[in-house]
Image: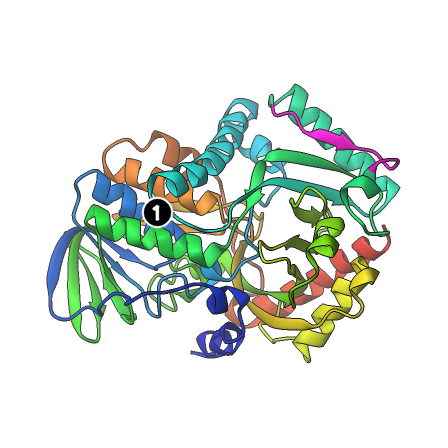
Amino acid sequence: MPLLDTDEQLARDSYYAATAQRGPGFAPLAGDVSCDVAIVGGGLAGLSAALELAQRGLTVRLLEAREVGWGASGRNGGQAIHGLACDQDTIEQQLGLDEAKRVWAMSIEALDLIRERIATHAIDCDWRDGYLGLATSARKGAALAAWADRMGSVYGYPLRRIGPGEVRDWIASPRYHSGVHDPRSGHLHPLKYTLGLARAAAAAGAVLHERTPVQALRHGEPAQIVTARGTVSARRVLLAGNVYLHGIAPALEPRIMPVGTYIACSERLDPALADSLVPSRSAVCDTNFVLDYFRTTNDHRMLYGGRVSYSTVTPARLPESMRRRMVQTFPQLAAAKVEYAWGGFVDISMSRAPDFGRLPGHGNVYYLQGFSGHGLALTGLAGRLVAEAMAGDAGRFDVFARLKHRAFPGGSLMRMPALVLGMAWYRLRDMLG
């Protein structure tokens, strides 16, 4: 499969893989088994659901084609941030203000859930509090300030506004005009967290299988998940493989697109220099549509993300191109070497709102997708919501399921070229301020 082949190359040089201990792993599926719930995908959404379902007393089998945390869950920027990838007004337009407030509150619950799971399951994953959202121009600064004011007055979520006169106290970069700070969001080592969640799910009774690619889904009561070495029969199925389902659920594929995103990590810096770059040690993200995001790690490195590919083609000379972006933001890192550069694919929806639901005509097959690059926290909550639904209380899951999603235009052949052209316009808009 071309996407998997490309991703294998991107996974080789991850800072996270170099600094996390995987342990013995989980045995592949062997033989035919049955359970209450079968889960396809060993990322944060699937593992969160496995944990929640097992805690409710259901029997669970989770199948992962590679290793748990191999995809975006173990390779992302590590930023756990309030809200969704889309603007709140996207949710308001579809669901109304009251339900939009409910969605926002659930996104904050997702942040609290990370802290809760870290504490409950003793997951050592380098958590740090704080998120800094920054604007690169006066126009964008005014929009960010207006948004922050509305989040405080309408949604009851106060954010600290950072004006042009004090922005350099928060970040040692000439690029930024103003910003906002949120102490409730934060950042962590995503692979350590994902592996910790896998251990917690297994301890709760879920059976995890790595190196078990799924070949087919047979619908029915029970449904059957077919692999090369066995079959899982289950009363319910959760598809949490995002862009890696590859024909298992063709109806879902036109609703998301794989977007490559890339990260570099510097060599270890002098601790005083690392502290000076972002004195609060918060996660940082700008407000551009094609955005940069970065943070300093616990071992005093600059971890910097910012390049994207809408064609699934990895940018040439990735380490050097990422180093240039990092130095454009922080000229004081001109002498710093890039030690790691990697990437991965996230699943974006047309609206950038998450896409949760049940397969049409197959009410016992649930799916979670479309996190659109903003899923580190929300995937954990999504697992809880789908577990609630499978256990008989679908109220919160169905708030998200009511969101309408359109297929990407162009069909299977032209979807990607159309997206590349569309994103070129957004890049131009960002450059024009």
Q: Residues within 10 Å of mark 1 (few under 14, many from 20)?
A: many
**Quadrant in which residue 322 is drawn:** bottom right
In this rendered view, identify the residue nearer to me: 31 or 184.
184
Percent x, y of residue 192:
43, 56
Q: Residue at x 17, y 54 (%)?
A: 234
Image quarter in which the N terminus is found: bottom left
- The amino acid type found where label 1 is placed reads Ser
In the displayed structure, does residue 299 sit left or right of residue 366?
right
Secondary structure under tag 1 reads helix
Visible in this render: residue 26? Answer: yes
Percent x, y of residue 144:
75, 36
What colouring does the structure picture have? rainbow
Which residue corresponds to mark 1?
A: 48
Percent x, y of residue 162:
78, 34
Q: How many marks?
A: 1
In this rendered view, identify the residue nearer to me: 116 or 1.
116
**Quadrant in which residue 186 is drawn:** top right
In this rendered view, identify the residue nearer to me: 402 or 163.
163
Residue 162 forms part of the magenta stretch:
yes
Percent x, y of residue 70:
42, 66
Q: Is residue 159 above or below residue 415?
A: above
Please provide the residue range marked out in magenta.
Answer: 157-166
In this rendered view, identify the residue nearer to me: 244 or 171.
171
Residue 372 forms part of the magenta stretch:
no
Q: Residue at x 44, y 63 (%)?
A: 20
Q: Residue at x 12, y 57 (%)?
A: 34
In the displayed structure, does residue 57 sit left or right of residue 406?
left
Visible in this render: residue 309? Answer: no
Magenta-highlighted stretch: main secondary structure?
loop
Q: Residue at x 63, y 72 (%)?
A: 339
